[in-house]
Image (cartoon, rainbow, N blue to C red):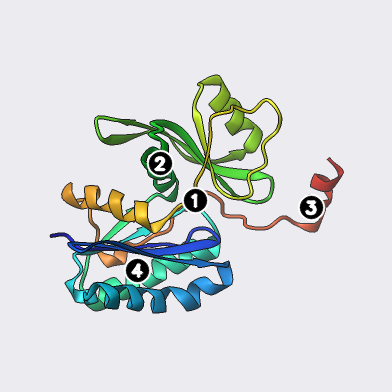
Amino acid sequence: MTTLLAIETSTEMASIALLSKSGLICRELTGVQTHSQGVLPAIQDILKEAGVTLKQCTAIAYGCGPGAFTGVRTACGIVQGLAFGADLPILPIVSLLAMAQAAYESQLADDVVCVLDARMGEVYWAHYHYQNKVWTQVSEPALSTGEQVFAYANLNKLTLVLGNGIALKDGTTEKIINKMPHAEQIARLALIDFSMEKQLAAADAQPLYLRNKIALTTAERALVKNN
């Protein structure tokens, strides 16, 4: 039986999951400031509840982003440290894909545009299609304005899967599901990847960055406010 530890910290809601022969156990943490302090104790707690040691895990999966700069760096750092110490492979899962999986599990949505708030008037998004028990990436993760993404979803009559903090204007598609990236779906998707031998070495834990710039200048903030 494959035993997977999964971590998702790309947003303000961090989560940890353990998928083992005993089933699925999850923990959630809220507040970005708690991620670095709370994730490791939560991992210890979840392993203890399942009666599993870290070395008994088959691999460690993590949400590689896109998302909050600090959050995705936290996930990579924790995963690398744990994987090196226990000599385990890793499985990076795109956080937007985890949202698509959650939408399918809850409402059987199979053609979705997943959207996360990227701040600075922009969003992270990707388009996924589910068929024959496999997700296909139609449009790869990208950084755009919300208006561009919503227009794309409307034009193609797609379901929007929205994370927290996404503001919609009148006329936006009515097919809306609210889901955040979660370790539960990271674990399930990672199990599929593991079966396809997509695991990587711990040294290869990298975040998915779509933006190098993480803050507006004073002049840029003034321009946004005036517009």
**What is the three-letter code of the residue carrying label 4?**
Val
Q: Gap between marks 4 and 2, in whole Å?
A: 28 Å
First reached walking from the N terminus: tag 2 or tag 1 = 2
User: Mark 4: which secondary structure?
Assistant: helix
Front: mark 3 or 2: 2
The residue wearing badge 4 is: 79
Identify the residue at horizontal 70%, vertical 33% (top origin).
Answer: 169
Q: Gap between marks 1 and 4, in whole Å?
A: 20 Å
The residue wearing badge 1 is: 180
The residue wearing badge 2 is: 106
Front: mark 4 or 2: 2
Q: Residue 120's spot in the image, x, y percent? A: 68, 50
Q: What crowding class fits label 2: few (fewer than 14 Cα within 10 Å), some (14-19), or many (20 or more)?
A: few
CB atoms of marks 4 and 2 within 8 Å: no
Left or right, 56 with reference to 147 = left
Q: Residue 149's spot in the image, x, y percent? A: 58, 33
Left or right, 6 with reference to 29 = left
Q: Residue 108 falls in which quadrant of the image?
A: top left
Along the line of sight, which residue is nearer the eye, 23 or 226?
23
First reached walking from the N terminus: tag 4 or tag 2 = 4
Q: Residue 20's spot in the image, x, y percent? A: 21, 62
User: Mark 1: which secondary structure?
Assistant: loop
**What is the three-letter code of the residue carrying label 1?**
Met
Front: mark 2 or 1: 2
